[in-house]
Image (cartoon, rainbow, N blue to C red):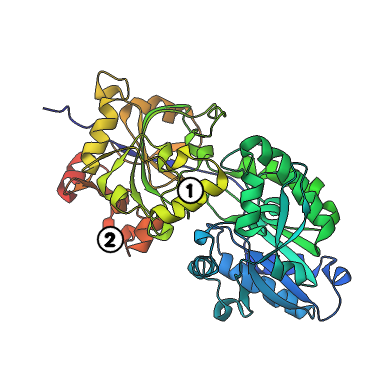
Amino acid sequence: MSPTLPPIARVRQSFNQPEVRDVPAAVARAISQSRIKHRVRPGGSIALTVGSRGIAGIDRIVKAAVEALRGLGFHPFVVAAMGSHGGGTAEGQGALLAELGVTEETVGCPVRTEMETVVLGTNSFGLPIHFDKNAFQADGILLLNRIKPHTSFTGRYESGLLKMLAIGLGKREGAAQVHKLGLPGLKTLLPEVGAFLLQKTPVALGVALLENAREHTARVAAIEPDDLLEVEPRLLDEARVLMARLPFDQIDVLIVGELGKNYSGTGLDPNVIGRQRVETMPDLPRPVVTRLGVLDLSVETCGNGLGVGLADLTTDRLVSGLDPTPMRVNSLTSNFLTRARVPLSLPTDRALIAACLNTCWRIDWAEARMVMIPNTLELTTLWVTPALQRDVESLEHLSRETDYGPIPFRDETLDQEALFPDSVRARRRGFTTEHTETTKWKTEEEREERF
């Protein structure tokens, strides 16, 4: 007979960070007060880049940018700048933009997703530099993107405007060329190709978005193209400080509710879980996770389970929902193959959690330092076992909000909506705090009555 699963309690992380109240207005102001009107002829066309998932309010931001550009007398259009995502097809990238709420109807301008590129030169490795044909033929390009730490490497430039320029607008062929030589090539080629394209393409302005640990916009910054190479690294440093992280250095078992591209480009954010799983590259120094289990794919990831290889165990239902086509395209384009390896799977969530506890190198399950999170993006609410109580008490930004009680299951499936009523998953399914009344469960008796 298996030991009893340890009880869990809800812990809240509090963050005192900046937040922009009216993001669309801030975006419009940044554009209007920039020098873009001096860089692009009156009435000229402006290619507005959109492509990264998970940016808070991206549909409203894009609409505000379109209206601001039109107010300056320009003719804007959205161009898909997402490299090989969406299966590397125009239809797939159009579908991804639509999932983000970015369509011609919602943002009020044409949306172009064609995959045709022009070759503008070669890089120092002798590989061709591809660039989106629609963007190249525009009178100006406005690079709009979030700046954040990359999920595969650490450098002076990571995820941001330069990456969108060099990889996103390179479409499938350009993304493949930059990733061709793996990490050494990526670290070298991203700044090199980005600097080359700043000189050879009509980049007229950059608008950088920084997000805080609550996934809300913390800052909007307009960057003139001449300043981009100098300014972006400073914004990256700021973004690194702002991002949410797990508060514990060592975790025996980490259970993640959902994996998905809407939470991280890698499905599970390595900056959060501490695992890189990139050939020749060591893992991050913290946190150190002994056993990691992931339960589900998000609906928004459309079967793309890239990042499942970062986990040790998963469920049969996650494996059955995988779509190998986008995983194959992403993995072969990036040249990081280990992240797509499918781990051992278990028939139920309860079996997965038990297997994690049984293999986390603790003799007594009651001593296991176990953490449960909904995904690697939403980290305000955590559920922890008693073994982490001392850590919770020692950290000022953590507070325990409930007593320890049994893990909630529905037919052997973890009740994620009950644990995380404010998560993307719960909102998607129409659950609210009022439906679950999770915040009112203070004692084990109340929890047992609910479950």
Q: Compared with residue 253, is residue 212 higher up or lower down, i.e. above or below? A: below
Taking the image as shown, residue 276 lies to the left or right of residue 414, namely right
Indicate the position of residue 351 as horizontal and vertical percent values: 21, 37
Residue at screen point 43% across, 37% down:
310
Q: Nearer the viewer, residue 115 or 40?
A: 115
Q: Which mark identifies residue 377?
A: 1
Indicate the position of residue 378 as horizontal and vertical percent values: 46, 48
Q: Earlier in the sequence, mark 1 or mark 2?
A: 1
In the orientation shown, which residue stands out farthest toward the right?
38
Q: Which mark identifies residue 435?
A: 2
Residue at screen point 75% across, 64% down:
30
Where does the N terminus fall, quadrant-wise?
Answer: top left
**Amino acid type shown at disc 1:** Leu
Label 2: which secondary element? helix
In the orientation shown, which residue stands out farthest toward the left?
1
Label 1: which secondary element? loop
Confirm whether residue 210 shows in the render.
Answer: no
**Amino acid type shown at disc 2:** His
Q: Compared with residue 52, is residue 401 higher up or lower down, i.e. above or below? A: above
Pointer 1: residues within 10 angstroms few (<14), some, or many (20+)? many
